[in-house]
């Protein structure tokens, strides 16, 4: 059985968290490890705020301010560790927009990626999720444009077939080219690398949608809290039913034990009466035998006197 106080405390914490979330816009990345998630957020930010490495670097959600009330959140890679997955999903639930990052060097979607997208949609709420989701192909610089287009369209088709979702925004980017644009001193080359990186197009998309996300944010957080509250109520109802069941069983057990004690008491009383009757009978027998012995003794004395 769960701790009732703990359920209440968790719900209160969620309420405070969602009140805070209603005043912020969270743009969250998602995807497997080493697919370029952290690098993408650094490119959007225009600075290296998130750590990038070939090893498993991000193990907890990390957020950085983007502009005004907008924050970018870097999440652990999915499927690397169950704890990492739990950490990532905890922030998906309050996200205003989720960018799913995929490395086309491994081909199209892995089955586990589609499964994780399905889990995200369920956690966030499917109607909201598909209106606030996009996926990004990274490592653009290593492919021909036509090849990336084929991969992207195939992945879009996979999402539509798997989830019957409407058209999902797709962005193809190169974090390498974006970094080159930041390092380039020649203004023409700088602009060329920037445009080829695909980052300006993604930034423009985000900027265009910020006003809408702000307008719907309070209602969104209220709806999410109501969903959490409903789950808490279900947990409390389950807890109540379990406690009621235990009490009912305890009552039945008590009644059964009381009846058993009563039966044992009655049997003991009956045994005592039987023992008393038996004892009385045995005492009468002893008295009778004693009288017979006395009479035989008297008879023996008399016979001795007669013989003497």
Image (cartoon, rainbow, N blue to C red):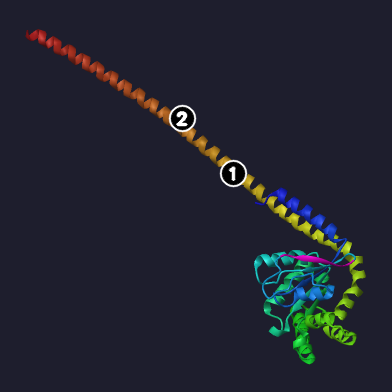
Location of residue 226 by image quarter? bottom right
| Residue at the (77%, 88%) spot, across then down | 148
The secondary element bearing badge 2 is classed as helix
Magenta-colored span: 60-67
- Check if residue 62 falls in the magenta segment: yes
The image's mark for residue 269 is: 2
Q: Is residue 139 above or below residue 124?
A: below
**Residue on which disc 1 sits:** 252
Q: Is residue 26 left or right of residue 76?
A: right
Q: Position of residue 252 (x, y in %)?
A: 59, 44
| Residue at the (77%, 86%) spot, across then down | 141
Count of numbered circles on the image:
2
The overriding secondary structure of the stretch rendered in magenta is strand
Q: Is residue 32 above or below residue 184?
A: above
Q: Name the one closer to the observer, 205 or 175.
A: 175
Location of residue 130 by image quarter? bottom right
| Residue at the (77%, 75%) spot, across then down | 39
């Amino acid at each position: 059985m769960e701790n009732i106080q703990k359920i209440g405390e968790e719900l209160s914490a969620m309420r405070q968290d969602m009140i805070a979330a209603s005043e912020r816009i969270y743009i969250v990345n998602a995807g497997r490890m080493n697919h370029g998630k952290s690098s993408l957020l650094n490119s959007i930010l225009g600075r290296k705020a998130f750590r990038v490495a070939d090893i498993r670097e991000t193990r907890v959600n990390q957020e950085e301010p983007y502009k005004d009330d907008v924050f970018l959140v870097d999440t652990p890679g999915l499927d690397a560790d169950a704890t990492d997955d739990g950490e990532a999903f905890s922030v998906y639930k309050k996200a205003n927009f989720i960018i799913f990052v995929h490395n086309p060097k491994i081909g199209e979607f892995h089955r586990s990626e589609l499964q994780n997208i399905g889990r995200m949609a369920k956690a966030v709420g499917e109607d909201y999720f598909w209106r606030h989701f996009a996926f990004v192909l990274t490592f653009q610089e290593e492919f021909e444009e036509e090849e990336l287009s084929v991969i992207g369209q195939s992945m879009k088709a996979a999402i539509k077939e798997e989830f019957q979702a409407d058209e999902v925004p797709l962005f193809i980017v190169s974090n390498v080219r974006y970094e080159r644009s930041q390092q380039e001193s020649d203004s023409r080359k700088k602009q060329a690398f920037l445009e080829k990186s695909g980052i300006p197009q993604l930034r423009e998309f985000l900027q265009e949608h910020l006003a809408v996300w702000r307008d719907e944010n309070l209602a969104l957080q209220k709806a999410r809290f109501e969903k959490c509250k409903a789950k808490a109520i279900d947990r409390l109802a389950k807890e109540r039913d379990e406690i009621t069941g235990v009490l009912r069983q305890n009552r039945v057990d008590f009644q059964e034990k009381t009846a058993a004690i009563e039966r044992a008491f009655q049997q003991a009383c009956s045994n005592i009466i039987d023992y008393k009757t038996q004892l009385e009978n045995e005492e009468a027998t002893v008295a009778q035998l004693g009288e017979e012995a006395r009479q035989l003794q008297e008879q023996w004395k008399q016979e001795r006197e007669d013989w003497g």
